[in-house]
């Protein structure tokens, strides 16, 4: 496997192209198409899509019916076929073609020195500024037929899907302009029949707000069809006798914008991006209703669901051609400030609403919560506080306990105390050291006599006691234990099972990854959820290093840090998202992580990320922590199989055995680790 090859990793590079058109001059337009095609070849593009009727011009009116023009179009197609024989990209160009006694508005698909097939426009607009039926016949009934183009008989129909034999997940369907605007486009049926990349050649004159309409249609088509949608509109050179043209190009994938060019360009423009074919396949694999919809359409209309597959060999470039798509370092945390603020608003209120419903359903108990001064317990505390506010109950019904142990620092203890005080909740301190010392003594543990044996028993004695106290306090004071552990910790098994922080009566943080927690706290500050005194403490908590504070710090040594053991949460949440939401293999996750993380100066960061906290990770580190993730993820399923209730928050998924994630606790990571072995160390 070529690890650094985008094609080997399941991507296909596509280009949505617009070009200056020479009206009624197919020879000149063929030259322009070939110039752009050669640029696409140099860029390693697999599919290049051009505008509607680009070989003739869209806006030539009755000249479309002239034999001189139509003959010249045939010659132009032959020129493009011959000159592109050695180019990688499959070219999709627009042309008017004669068929029987009528003229068709067509997309001609060219690859490897031949015309692979022709897709006719199915739906012809004949309203407002459009009058295409004056010149063309609709092609929606031309399934399973042929047409003669450039001296050869080739497949014709709106049902053609072009399948790459050496990249089998690349399955292209083509439709033209208005086809996208009807309630059930040809591309929808093609997607149900297996097409993964949907192309649209558009003329589409521009009027105010039409660009937004197109974007809405393209985005929704890609989202609804779990597909990539490549859109290319006519621009410079089209007649402005009565209309204008903006040359809009864009590519969406499963509802996400991968790229677009500026509108109203002078000269040709190309949106060149890498489409993730694995993502499309995985989305369809998970959404069973996608195929159910195909079965429903098949009932009573078998002829409509049949497609004609046309095979071809792509012969994509090998080696490292880069990756042309935006990659989120933090897939759970948007880079866009407005989107991040909305995500935080929704996440926060999902958690609050979940806890409110639980309170009301079981008789309005108090909220019992252990706070350490760290991120997770801080966020759970402010969620519980806001839930009481929303229910009209006093904040004193939130019972916050800090329980210092052998390694609790003065800073975190002070932060926990100040936060509880500023929020106005009931606050108490319980020193667990005497109970922990007694338990260690009962266990005949070396640390009971002052020895420096800081093993898992030593740590879990403290973690278990804290949880034990919380449950007994809940019994005593009529409350429920509000859990604080987050999604990332559950994935990595970084929690104490049973009588430990894995257990609670209701865990508000179970669906929130570690990398999002800090942004939720920052959002609560920025949005004025609490007063200045509380906000000051919250800001200080955000500056603290993540630590369980279970092992005493030895002079001259680094304080116990969670990420030294489980790995950087930035990398582990990156992996978690792509395992849980996308089902990717370790080799692909490593490839994506390397592109996202190897250069801290490249790409975007979430809002508010300080420059001095922007790390970079090289492939050796990425591979190491991926192995840690795989081993811990499989070894810890037994903890996730017994999770308490808690709301799903992110579309990225959750670990609930009643929801997004179910697996046997005795499964092995062998196959995943074997795949990881294919990742180079440099």
Image (spheres, grey):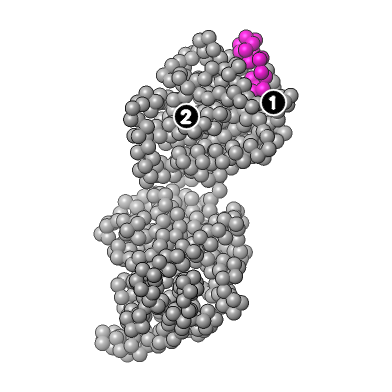
Which circle's residue, 2 or 1, is located before the other in the chain?
A: 2
Tell me if residue 155 is in the magenta stretch: no
Q: Is residue 67 left or right of residue 89?
A: right
Residue in the picture at 68% in, 38% down: 208
**Pick the front one: 408 or 245:** 245
Please, is residue 506 above or below residue 215 in the view? below
- Above-or-below relation of 589 to 187: below
**Mark 1 nearby-residue class (10 Å; few <14, some 14–19, many ≥20):** many
Q: Is residue 191 visible?
A: yes
- The residues colored magenta run 55-73
Residue 645 image position (x, y, % from top left) = 35, 65
Residue 69 located within the stretch drawn in magenta = yes
Q: Report the residue that reaches farthest toward the right.
A: 241
Of 178 and 458, the residue lying toward us: 178
> Horizontally, is 501 left or right of 154 in the view?
left
Q: Label 1's element?
A: loop
Residue at x 58% of width, y 19% of height: 133
The quarter of the picture where the N terminus appears is top left
Residue 112 point in image, percent of width and height:
50, 23
Pointers 2 and 1 in contact (C-beta within 8 Å): no
Assign a secondary structure to mark 2: helix
Residue 379 visible in image:
no
Give the vertical position of 433 relative to 203 (above or below): below
Q: Nearer the viewer, residue 357 or 568?
A: 357
> Residue 284 is drawn in which quadrant?
top left
Residue located at (49% from left, 70% from top): 390
Q: Bin the neighbour count of mark 2 within 10 Å (Cα to Cα): few under 14, some 14-19, many 20 and up.
A: many
* Residue ID for mark 2: 186
Residue 222 spot, x, y in % from top left: 49, 40
Q: Which residue is painted at 64% across and 23% down in the image?
A: 58
Identify the main secondary structure in magenta: helix
**For mark 1, what is the residue?**
238
């Amino acid at each position: 496997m070529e690890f650094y090859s985008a094609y080997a990793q399941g991507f296909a590079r596509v280009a949505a192209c617009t070009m200056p058109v020479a009206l009624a001059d197919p020879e000149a337009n063929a030259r322009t198409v070939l110039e752009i095609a050669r640029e696409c070849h140099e860029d390693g593009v697999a599919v290049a899509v051009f505008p509607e009727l680009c070989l003739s011009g869209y806006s030539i009116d009755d000249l479309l019916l002239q034999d001189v023009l139509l003959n010249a179009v045939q010659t132009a197609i032959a020129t493009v076929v011959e000159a592109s024989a050695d180019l990688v990209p499959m070219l999709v160009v627009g042309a008017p073609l004669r068929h029987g006694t009528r003229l068709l508005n067509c997309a001609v698909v060219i690859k490897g020195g031949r015309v692979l097939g022709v897709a006719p426009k199915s739906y012809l607009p004949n309203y407002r500024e459009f009058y295409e039926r004056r010149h063309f016949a609709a092609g929606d009934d031309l399934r399973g037929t042929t047409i003669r183009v450039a001296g050869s008989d080739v497949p014709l129909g709106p049902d053609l899907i072009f399948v790459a034999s050496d990249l089998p997940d690349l399955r292209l369907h083509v439709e033209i302009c208005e086809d996208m605007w009807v309630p059930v486009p040809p591309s929808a049926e093609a997607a149900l029949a297996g097409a993964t990349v949907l192309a649209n050649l558009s003329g589409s004159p521009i009027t105010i707000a039409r660009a937004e309409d197109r974007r809405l249609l393209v985005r929704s088509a890609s989202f609804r069809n779990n597909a990539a949608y490549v859109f290319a509109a006519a621009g410079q050179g089209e007649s402005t006798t009565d209309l204008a043209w903006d040359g809009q190009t864009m590519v969406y994938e499963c509802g996400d914008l991968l790229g677009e060019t500026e509108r109203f360009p002078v000269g040709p423009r190309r949106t060149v991006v890498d489409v993730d074919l694995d993502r499309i396949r995985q989305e369809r694999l998970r959404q069973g209703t996608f195929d159910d919809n195909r079965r429903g359409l098949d009932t009573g209309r078998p002829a409509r669901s049949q497609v004609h597959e046309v095979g071809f060999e792509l012969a994509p470039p090998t080696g490292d051609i880069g990756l042309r798509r935006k990659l989120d370092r933090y897939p759970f945390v948007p880079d866009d400030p407005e989107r991040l603020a909305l995500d935080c608003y929704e996440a926060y209120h999902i958690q609050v609403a979940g806890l409110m419903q639980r309170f009301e359903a079981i008789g309005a108990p108090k909220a019992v919560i252990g706070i350490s001064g760290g991120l997770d317990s801080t966020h759970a505390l402010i969620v519980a506080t806001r839930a009481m506010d929303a229910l009209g109950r006093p904040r004193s019904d939130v019972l916050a306990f800090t329980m210092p142990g052998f390694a609790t620092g003065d800073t975190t203890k002070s932060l926990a105390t100040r936060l509880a005080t500023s929020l106005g909740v009931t606050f108490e301190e319980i020193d667990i050291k005497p109970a922990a010392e007694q338990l260690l003594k009962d266990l005949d543990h070396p640390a009971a006599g002052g020895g420096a044996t800081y093993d898992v028993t030593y740590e879990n004695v403290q973690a278990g006691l804290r949880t034990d106290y919380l449950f007994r306090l809940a019994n005593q004071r009529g409350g429920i234990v509000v859990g604080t552990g987050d999604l990332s910790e559950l994935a990595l098994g970084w929690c104490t099972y049973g009588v430990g922080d894995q257990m609670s009566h209701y865990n508000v943080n179970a669906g929130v990854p570690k990398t999002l927690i800090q942004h939720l706290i920052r959002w609560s500050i920025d949005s004025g959820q609490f007063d200045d005194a509380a906000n000051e403490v919250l800001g200080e908590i955000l500056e603290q290093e993540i630590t369980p504070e279970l092992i005493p710090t030895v002079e001259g040594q680094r304080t116990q840090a969670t990420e030294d053991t489980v790995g950087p949460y930035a990398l582990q949440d990156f992996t978690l998202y792509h395992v849980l939401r996308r089902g990717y293999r370790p080799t692909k996750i490593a490839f994506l992580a390397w592109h996202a993380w190897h250069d801290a100066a490249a790409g975007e960061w979430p809002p508010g990320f300080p420059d001095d906290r922007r790390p970079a990770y090289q492939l050796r580190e990425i591979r190491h922590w991926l192995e840690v993730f795989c081993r811990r993820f499989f070894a810890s399923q037994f903890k996730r199989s017994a999770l308490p209730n808690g709301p799903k928050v992110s579309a990225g998924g959750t670990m609930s055995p009643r929801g997004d994630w179910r697996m046997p606790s005795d499964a092995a990571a062998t196959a995943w680790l074997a795949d990881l072995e294919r990742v180079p160390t440099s």
